[in-house]
């Protein structure tokens, strides 16, 4: 079906994008396994990300068991502890958060929200998932090779990452980690190019960039950032792999190991740090920007109010994306740098707080005098705002060289980045799942289970990470398997560590209830209908719920932005983007 | 990190120009009705935009390599690899391939199948000769003691030329796929969208190679040192 012509009867301009129905798969395998439907690919991405995320969750439990109750669990050795730390960090940041926001929500929401039938290159999109799955499998394989996975820390700093003193350094652990990351980046590039081109070239008639929901703006900008930032990690991984396997010395200076001079020489470990953090800091916003976008939509829908300062929100997303490329070295203050560089990176780090603060103010002002419905998505959105502000404020401290240097290697930093990059985006993921689950399955998630899930997660996360700031401030270093009772601690922390660990176990356990809710509600959840939240954006206007392959009967026409809520004189408290209603004193349709 | 920052400045400029066409100052909450989309129309097919975006990613990759190269030279001074004269000839071959592909585009637009076929064969041969020439340079360097696991400058040469060559190999496969898909069409014009994208790919990979070549020759460092001296 191709429609390129204008519709004279309705006086509509011609379509910019041809309405072509994607070919349907006829076999079960084509539909559900090697599916080219972005919605199934989204579910595949999400399922895989959650599965590997659960592994990382268990690893965090094991870490906390050691820190909270040192010496109690014989199977947690120092080597194993470092492996848990490394794999937990890498899995959570890359294989869970990045994959679920871009591969999961990006795939499901972009075509629906821009009014497309699918991604522009469905085959490449499918390939993207399978390469991602391969990357995950390679990563998991590292648990089963001699020596186990790498224990180099999630930053994989050379030279220690490839030396025999580090778990997995002289064996296959580090090799599998690097190969897995390279595969992940290749897979993401296929998917990311698809997301970007779909937003650029497959928007339906009337869907201008300034009518896109902020979710799409967030995912789109994060995708562009990831496409530009991941090459830095790719290059770093390839070069380190060469160092480990082929004897090059890109990052390896002259070294003596166990009294023996190694063949390396002439390389620069600091170069790796630059490459890693050139990816690493944008990565924070690659996760945060989709979360910003999604939370904006959740707040507008569940407060029945148009988003405050839409233009500013768009500009802030773009500006944050651009600025995040010139702050990377604030992760390297303790590596040493020229004082002027320290000043420059501290300044850019503080400047990035301005557009971020604009977003926070706009969320609060959207809530102001809104018709706030304390639904589960709204609860998680509110949880996100509070957590993000808390984590962001400690980030302002750490952005300054003089504060960062003494705190950099303490648990304070661990608490900071878990608040801002762990708890906050995961709150958004939960909120988004409660919000869009009815569209994905046609049923509502169970409210009682959801309430327990929210309150235990929210209070539990604060029970874990609030005291952790204090633990860091009194001087507990991070990355230590066991610290004993050193004299430099200004207060005892044993009891607090045990409390944090207990809270972490409870927060982790309640996630099982969330997973059970996903399963239980699939069959027994209340029927949702097509638009249970009475939302205005395009994905809620599909003719069927869940949307079928191709999404629409005919491509929709967009007459307005995505935030027309509580419009005076409108027949309902929301106006769908496809609704041609105009207000000129009386109810009429265009 | 000067090289990657300069590259990203170019990307930011292009993004800024594009964003300036998207009416970012409009007030969507006041606007109702069908509004026209910017950035669509002939020549903006999704496939072409895909290639442009991919080239930006590849540009980031090579800029990161360039940055790492410059950084290492500054931090741990080492002697550059004396590049054999064959590299100049290889560069000329890649330039020839790029020119031939532009002729392919012209022939496809005019619908002249004979010229198209000849230009296509010439472009493919020139590209393959470039790749073979690069391998020959590797052999020459290795024989001269500049091995992959030797000094970092040599390692960089192998890595950069290897990744660049892989991108060109991918391009050849894509070009072959475009030609095979339309082999039975009978109309040379059917090839136009595909060969346009391929030609752009070749031109940009040539530009990347010229910049990397300058860096590997040490000219980039001299230029950066001059810039720093001017600034300080």
Image (spheres, rainbow, N blue to C red):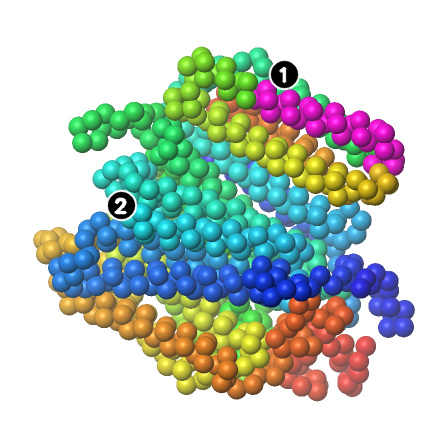
Q: Which residue is mark 2?
A: A147
Q: Is residue B36 visible?
A: no
Q: Which residue is mark 1?
A: B89
Mark 2 surroundings within 10 Å by alpha-carbon count, few (fewer than 14), some (14 through 19), many (20 or more): some
| Location of the C terminus of chain A (image quadrant) | bottom right
Q: Is residue B170 above or below residue A282?
A: above
On the image, the x and y values in percent for residue B169 come to 61, 33
Instruction: Identify the magenta region.
Output: B108-134
Name the outermost residue toward the front. A27
Between A393 and A477, the one lying in front of the other is: A477
Residue B117: in magenta span = yes
Secondary structure character of the magenta stretch overall? helix
Left or right for A558, reference B87 = right
Q: Are marks 2 and 1 on the same chain?
A: no
- The chain containing the residue under callout 2 comes to A
Gap between marks 2 and 1 measured at Cα: 48 Å
Residue A430 occupies which quadrant of the picture?
Answer: bottom left
- Determine the residue positioned at 53% across, 27% down: B161
Q: Is residue A526 visible?
A: yes
Residue B129: in magenta span = yes
Left or right for A463, reference A453 = left
Q: Is residue A488 above or below residue A269?
A: below
| Location of the N terminus of chain A (image quadrant) | bottom right
On the image, the x and y values in percent for residue A499 come to 20, 70
On the image, the x and y values in percent for residue A292 come to 51, 64
Residue A534: image tag: none
Residue A532 occupies which quadrant of the picture?
Answer: bottom right
Of helix, strand and loop, which one carries label 2?
loop
Of helix, strand and loop, which one carries label 1?
helix
Between A140 and A506, the one lying in front of the other is: A140
Looking at the rendered image, the disc whose residue lies closer to the viewer, 2 or 1, is: 2
- Determine the residue positioned at 86% across, 40% down: B186
């Amino acid at each position: 079906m191709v429609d390129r012509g204008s519709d004279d009867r309705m006086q509509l301009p011609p379509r910019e994008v041809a309405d072509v129905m994607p070919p349907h798969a006829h076999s079960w395998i084509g539909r559900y396994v090697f599916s080219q439907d972005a919605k199934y690919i989204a579910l595949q991405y999400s399922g895989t990300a959650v599965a590997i995320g659960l592994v990382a969750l268990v690893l965090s439990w094991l870490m906390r068991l050691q820190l909270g109750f040192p010496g109690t669990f014989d199977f947690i050795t120092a080597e194993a502890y470092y492996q848990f730390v490394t794999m937990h960090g890498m899995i959570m940041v890359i294989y869970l958060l990045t994959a679920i926001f871009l591969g999961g929500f990006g795939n499901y929401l972009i075509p629906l929200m821009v009014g497309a039938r699918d991604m522009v290159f469905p085959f490449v999109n499918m390939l993207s998932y399978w390469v991602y799955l391969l990357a995950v499998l390679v990563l998991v394989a590292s648990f089963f090779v001699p020596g186990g996975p790498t224990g180099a820390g999630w930053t994989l700093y050379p030279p220690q990452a490839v030396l025999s003193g580090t778990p997995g350094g002289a064996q296959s652990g580090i090799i599998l980690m690097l190969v897995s990351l390279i595969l992940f980046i290749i897979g993401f590039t296929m998917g990311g190019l698809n997301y970007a081109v779909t937003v650029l070239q497959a928007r339906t008639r009337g869907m201008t960039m300034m009518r896109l929901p902020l979710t799409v703006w967030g995912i789109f900008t994060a995708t562009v950032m990831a496409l530009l930032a991941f090459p830095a990690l790719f290059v770093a991984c390839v070069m380190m792999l060469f160092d480990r396997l082929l004897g090059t010395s890109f990052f390896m200076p002259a070294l003596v190991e166990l009294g023996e001079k190694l063949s390396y020489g002439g390389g620069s470990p600091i170069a790796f740090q630059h490459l890693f953090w050139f990816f690493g800091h944008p990565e924070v916003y690659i996760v945060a920007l989709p979360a910003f976008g999604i939370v904006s939509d959740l707040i507008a829908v569940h407060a029945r109010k148009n988003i405050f300062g839409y233009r500013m929100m768009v500009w802030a997303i773009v500006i944050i994306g651009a600025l995040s490329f010139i702050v990377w070295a604030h992760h390297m203050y303790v590596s040493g740098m020229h004082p002027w560089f320290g000043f420059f990176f501290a300044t850019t780090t503080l400047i990035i707080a301005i557009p971020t603060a604009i977003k926070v103010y706009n969320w609060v002002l959207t809530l102001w005098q809104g018709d706030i419905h304390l639904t589960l998505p709204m609860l998680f959105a509110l949880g996100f705002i509070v957590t993000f502000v808390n984590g962001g404020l400690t980030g302002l401290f750490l952005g300054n060289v003089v504060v960062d240097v003494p705190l950099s290697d303490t648990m304070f930093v661990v608490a900071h980045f878990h608040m801002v990059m762990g708890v906050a985006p995961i709150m958004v993921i939960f909120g988004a799942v409660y919000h869009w689950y009815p569209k994905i399955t046609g049923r509502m998630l169970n409210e009682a289970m959801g309430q327990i899930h929210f309150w235990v997660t929210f209070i539990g996360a604060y029970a874990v990470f609030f005291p952790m700031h204090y633990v860091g401030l009194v001087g507990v270093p991070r990355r230590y398997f066991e610290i004993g009772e050193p004299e430099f601690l200004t207060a005892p922390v044993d009891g607090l560590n045990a409390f944090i660990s207990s809270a972490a176990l409870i927060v982790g356990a309640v996630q099982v209830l969330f997973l059970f809710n996903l399963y239980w509600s699939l069959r027994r959840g209340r029927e949702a209908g097509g638009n249970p939240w009475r939302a205005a954006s395009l994905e809620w206007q599909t003719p069927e719920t869940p949307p079928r392959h191709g999404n629409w009967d005919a491509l929709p026409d967009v007459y307005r932005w995505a935030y027309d809520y509580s419009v005076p004189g409108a027949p309902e408290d929301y106006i769908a983007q496809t609704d041609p209603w105009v207000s000129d004193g009386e109810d009429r349709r265009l | 990190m000067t090289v990657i920052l300069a590259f990203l400045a170019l990307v930011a400029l292009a993004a800024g120009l594009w964003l300036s066409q998207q009416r970012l100052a409009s007030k969507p909450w006041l606007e109702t009705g069908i509004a026209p989309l910017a950035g669509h129309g002939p020549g903006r097919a999704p496939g072409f935009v895909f290639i442009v975006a991919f080239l930006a990613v590849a540009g980031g990759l090579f800029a990161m390599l360039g940055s790492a190269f410059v950084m290492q030279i500054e931090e741990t001074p080492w002697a550059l690899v004396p590049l054999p004269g064959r590299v100049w000839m290889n560069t000329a071959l890649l330039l020839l391939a790029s020119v031939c592909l532009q002729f392919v585009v012209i022939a496809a637009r005019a619908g002249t199948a004979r010229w198209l076929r000849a230009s296509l064969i010439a472009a493919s041969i020139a590209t393959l000769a470039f790749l073979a020439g690069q391998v020959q340079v590797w052999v020459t360097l290795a024989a001269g003691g500049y091995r992959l696991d030797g000094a970092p400058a040599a390692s960089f040469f192998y890595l950069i030329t290897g990744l660049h060559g892989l991108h060109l190999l991918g391009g050849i496969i894509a070009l072959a796929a475009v030609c095979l898909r339309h082999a039975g069409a009978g109309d040379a014009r059917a090839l136009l969208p595909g060969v346009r994208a391929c030609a752009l790919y070749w031109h940009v990979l040539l530009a990347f190679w010229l910049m990397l070549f300058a860096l590997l020759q040490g000219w980039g460092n001299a230029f950066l040192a001059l810039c720093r001296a001017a600034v300080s």
